[in-house]
Image (cartoon, rainbow, N blue to C red):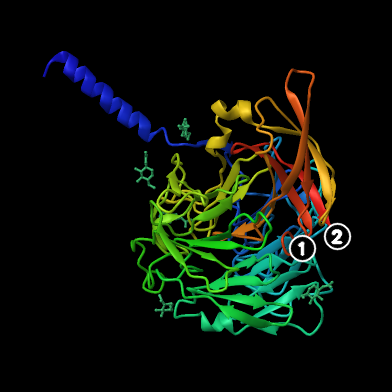
Amino acid sequence: MKPSRFLLLLFVCMVMLESRADLPGTWELLVEDARIASMHTAVTRFNTVILLDRTNVGPTQTTLDPSSKSDCQIDPEHPVLKPGCYSQSAILDLNTKKVRPLFTTLTDTWCSSGQFMPDGTLLQTGGNNDGYKKIRKLIPCEATSSCDWDELEDTELAEGRWYSTNQILPNGSVIIIGGRDAVSVELFPSQGGGALNFPFLAEAEDIQTDNLYPYVHLLPNGHLFVFANNQSVLYDYTNNVVLKRYPVLTGGPRNYPSAGSSVMLALKGDYSTATVVVCGGAQYGAFHEGKTDATARRSCGRIEATAENPVWEMEAMPFGRIMGDMVILPTGDVLIINGAEAGSQGFEMASRPCLSPVLYKPDESMGLRFVTLNNTSVPRMYHSTANLLPDGRVLVAGSNPHNFYNLTDKFPTELSIEAFSPDYMSPEKASIRPTITELPEKIQYGGGFDIVVSGKFLEVGLVEVNIASAPFATHSFSQGQRLVKLAVSRSSSAADMDGGRLHTLTCTAPPDGRVAPPGYYMLFAVNMGVPSVAKWVQLLER
Ligand SMILES: *[C@@H]1O[C@H](CO)[C@@H](O)[C@H](O)[C@H]1NC(C)=O
Ligand SMILES: *[C@@H]1O[C@H](CO)[C@@H](O)[C@H](O)[C@H]1NC(C)=O
Ligand SMILES: *[C@@H]1O[C@H](CO)[C@@H](O)[C@H](O)[C@H]1NC(C)=O
Ligand SMILES: *[C@@H]1O[C@H](CO)[C@@H](O)[C@H](O)[C@H]1NC(C)=O
Ligand SMILES: *[C@@H]1O[C@H](CO)[C@@H](O)[C@H](O)[C@H]1NC(C)=O
């Protein structure tokens, strides 16, 4: 071969190798050792992140200072936890990246559920052992203050809730659905009368359960879309009746322990329709038969949950994935991240971590919706989480496929916390990134309000204003996750002092709690696919 030919070939090879590493998105290490593996993760309106593990995991790495509290030993009778002074929960300050252990002695939060209340309080329910019927609250505070968990002593759940799902309702109550051996729903605050039977969950159960941590989406028609195993229903929780049964989703079971994931796509327009997507999952029997190398499913089902006669539209992801997390980005695209390419959900049940995040672009046509993103180097399998941050990045935490902490296994208990930056945060897009300079602290249902946005290359008329809830992420599903695109009716602009322009956008808040339940949301301005840093607004009744 002529030397010039060889050089050309070398060049082509290098370009090819380069392009493999050139997939969109970047990773950064936020906290090298958080000293806790977050099984449940939630972002608060103070830009802090609540990290929560279970108490019967054995000692975590987070030791507390015994002198600060007379008794920080969790239940000395506990069958697993050795007497000691360990924290099972912590709070991360996104500004300083400092992790503060939370002190309050908790009962067991293993595979529990949660949801933010309208006033911003994190409600956290159930778990295992002594935590089975427990209700806990954390009222978030400024990062420099010292808020902590409070376990309610005067009230408990009507039923034990282990692997249940919470969803905030239009009136601000929270519904708690299902759980192991809990074929029922209940409300917080309790309206008396205990739990209501919900036989659908029993119908969806099979030999390996597959009906745990059901996927629950509050539709804009005020009813709940509830998905378990391969079945789903339209559920009228007010009258405790199933209004509709959707067609069975083919391609195997999707809920614990066969973990796929699910989102309701962004609500927009006149909010009359809602589309649900369910992606990935284990092969049937992988859990029951302990097949850790059974290839995970690539299939995604997508259904218009509000249609008269909806059908599942099937698509294939670039990778099979179990235990993925689906995160709705401020643009309405969905990030699918974390998980494994084989096995099922549970201790020591998976192999082949899926290191590639994937972007799902719902507005593209079939076949063009998936984009493979830049690989991580950190396997995040069972008990890992992903949460949207107010600056548009995605916080990725946890992974502990073992019963106890094991820092030396091939898939160790993962104490690091990372942030994934989607392509919209790349330096080339910085110039079109808008900045919110003014907005109200509170917005009311159906009410108009103005925000002021600055930016040099703002496409007035195309700028979106979108509000994102802060969900409770656990076990590959973000409870209460939603994105609502607001109507932007008018905009006017004026020059700012730096030669850029200030744009006043008149927006309309969601019409009611069915479209967006009351509470705190991250409000993003999105310019040509690039979101601003969000500011928190509280959505209230008039
Ligand atoms: C992929 O992520 C790594 C960090 O994990 C980063 O060094 C690299 O630049 C990223 N690739 C692109 C194309 O951004
Ligand atoms: C909220 O809605 C639920 C379900 O319809 C209802 O049972 C409950 O009483 C309502 N809560 C309040 C405080 O009105
Ligand atoms: C739905 O799941 C059940 C229980 O796992 C299974 O027996 C049935 O064949 C599945 N149906 C379809 C259409 O995949
Ligand atoms: C990314 O990770 C997957 C495993 O999830 C692996 O198959 C693939 O080769 C990796 N890609 C690159 C470019 O390293
Ligand atoms: C951690 O995992 C390694 C490798 O699987 C195993 O040999 C070791 O016993 C485990 N350690 C603990 C404390 O379980």
Between 11 and 136, which is closer to the camera in this rendering? Answer: 11
Left or right: where 189 falls relative to 125: right
Q: Mark 1: which amino acid?
A: Gly
C-alpha gap between disc 2 and disc 1: 8 Å
Can you identify the residue that label 2 sits on? 541
- Determine which of the numbered discs, if any, sits on residue 513 in the image: 1
The amino acid pointed to by label 2 is Glu
Q: Position of residue 1 (x, y in %)?
A: 11, 19
Q: Residue furthest right?
A: 542
Which percent across, then down, holds residue 405? 53, 55
* 305, above or below 366, in the image: below
Secondary structure found at label 2: loop
Q: Secondary structure at mark 1?
A: loop
Q: Quadrant of residue 416?
A: top right
Q: Horizontally, is 468 left or right of 359 in the view?
A: right
List x then y, in percent, for residue 65: 74, 48
Viewer can see residue 75? no
Q: Earlier in the sequence, mark 2 or mark 1?
A: 1
